């Protein structure tokens, strides 16, 4: 009788702990304080399948994302830090919202309605990812979202006229939504009172093998017949070049490292891949852009986006100086980014899809990462 009771109690305990572990919801806790005195919060989002994402309201940074491998064991698959100070002092945009303009603008200059605007030169002679204090380095107002479909966070802020040199008072809303279908969706929306440029994206670095090595064996597929060649400063030449018969052809899935060391001028300029692919048209409300697979863990991700391009960055500038979670030194190519966006330097490239936003218009774009295993 006592043995039977013990079995029942153990079964109930296991059941309760399992249900608790996989209960969908949002938890908020302190993460630190900025020199300005502003307190930063860490939000833990969990879907009904136990996928867990941690996000802070500084930069909208995804600090952790735990998804299961093919054996059902969860593991953190994104690069990041364990404390606020490191994100403030020295972060290569780990997990952050990027804006007002993701990627590079040549010489930090562009012209709108006959007026020339000058931006900070924070990447050699060029402007990168919104400037010295881009959207990755500001505090966002946050609002939790809970529904039958999953959990999320609504980030919002007002970027004042001429912030970092950009014209117009820009109201921005970015929603992260972790679905019970194991998808992670990003919805971006913006409005302005004066013509400006906008190109928002998300800058998470992935390593599906939990940072146990580099990403060269990850298998990438990109639904793109052309890419955007760049010059030695990584500014587009204006050409859209076919990927066929080149190291840039990912129309069929292949290992990231298969051609990354080839003697190709574009690979030399980027020290690997740091280019935008021109996405092919495809069906669906949010078209298919590509996929990423790790043969070791079995983790698989599909990417869908309404954007015309995707920047694939193979972590070429990681050099071991960024010491991340669990004391891991992020070495060369230990993470990769798949940044859905418009093309670099579009304000200065008349043949590229436009990035200007006028008063009365609404900027809207969406991207979805869908996770599974193989």
Image (spheres, grey):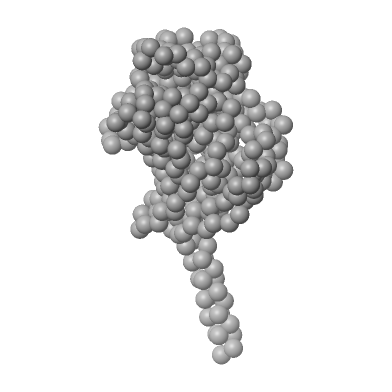
- Residue at x 35% of width, y 12% of height: 351
Identify the residue at image location x=51%, y=34%: 135
Q: In this orientation, which residue lies closer to the viewer: 244 or 62?
A: 62
Q: Is residue 257 left or right of residue 357?
A: right
Q: How many marks?
A: 0
Say above or below: 33 vs 259: below
Kindly identify the residue that appears in the image at 56 percent across and 90 percent down. 1
Q: Nearer the viewer, residue 20 or 113?
A: 113
Can residue 91 be spotted in the picture? Answer: yes
**Residue 277 shows up from this direction:** no
Q: Position of residue 61 (x, y in %)?
A: 54, 41
Q: Position of residue 368 (x, y in %)?
A: 40, 39
Q: Is residue 96 above or below residue 167?
A: below
Residue 20 on image: x %, y %: 51, 66
Front residue of this view, candidates 32 and 301? 32
Height in image: 358 above or below 21?
Answer: above
Residue found 57% across the figure and 36% down from its top: 137
Tell me where residue 225 appears, x and y as whole percent. Answer: 38, 19
């Amino acid at each position: 009788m006592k043995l039977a009771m013990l079995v029942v109690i153990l079964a109930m305990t296991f059941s309760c702990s399992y249900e608790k572990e996989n209960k969908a919801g949002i938890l908020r806790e302190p993460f630190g304080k900025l020199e300005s005195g502003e307190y930063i919060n860490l939000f833990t989002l969990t879907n009904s399948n136990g996928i867990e994402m941690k996000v802070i309201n500084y930069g909208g940074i995804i600090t952790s994302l735990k998804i299961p491998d093919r054996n059902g064991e969860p593991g953190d698959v994104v690069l990041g830090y364990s404390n606020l100070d490191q994100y403030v002092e020295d972060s290569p945009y780990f997990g952050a919202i990027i804006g007002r303009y993701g990627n590079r603008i040549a010489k930090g200059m562009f012209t709108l309605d006959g007026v020339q605007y000058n931006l900070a030169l924070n990447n050699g002679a060029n402007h990168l990812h919104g400037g010295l204090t881009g959207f990755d380095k500001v505090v966002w107002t946050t609002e939790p979202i809970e529904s039958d479909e999953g959990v999320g966070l609504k980030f919002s802020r007002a970027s004042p006229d001429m912030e970092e040199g950009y014209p117009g008072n820009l109201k921005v809303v970015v929603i992260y939504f972790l679905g019970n279908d194991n998808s992670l969706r990003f919805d971006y929306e913006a409005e302005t009172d004066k013509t400006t440029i906008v190109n928002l994206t998300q800058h998470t670095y992935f390593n599906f093998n939990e940072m146990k090595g580099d990403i060269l064996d990850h298998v990438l597929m990109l639904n793109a017949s052309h890419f955007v060649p760049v010059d030695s400063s990584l500014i587009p030449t204006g050409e859209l070049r076919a990927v066929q018969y080149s190291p840039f052809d990912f129309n069929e899935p292949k290992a990231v490292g298969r051609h990354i060391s080839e003697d190709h001028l574009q690979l030399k300029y980027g020290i690997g891949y740091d280019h935008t692919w021109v996405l092919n048209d495809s069906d669906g409300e949010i078209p298919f852009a590509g996929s990423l697979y790790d043969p070791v863990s079995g983790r698989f991700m599909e990417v869908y986006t309404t954007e015309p391009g995707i920047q694939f960055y193979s972590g070429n500038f990681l050099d071991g100086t960024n010491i991340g979670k669990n004391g891991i030194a992020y070495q060369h190519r230990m993470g990769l980014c798949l940044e859905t966006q418009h093309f670099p330097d579009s304000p200065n490239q008349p043949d590229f899809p436009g990035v200007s936003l006028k008063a009365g218009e609404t900027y809207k774009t969406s991207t979805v990462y869908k996770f599974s295993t193989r």
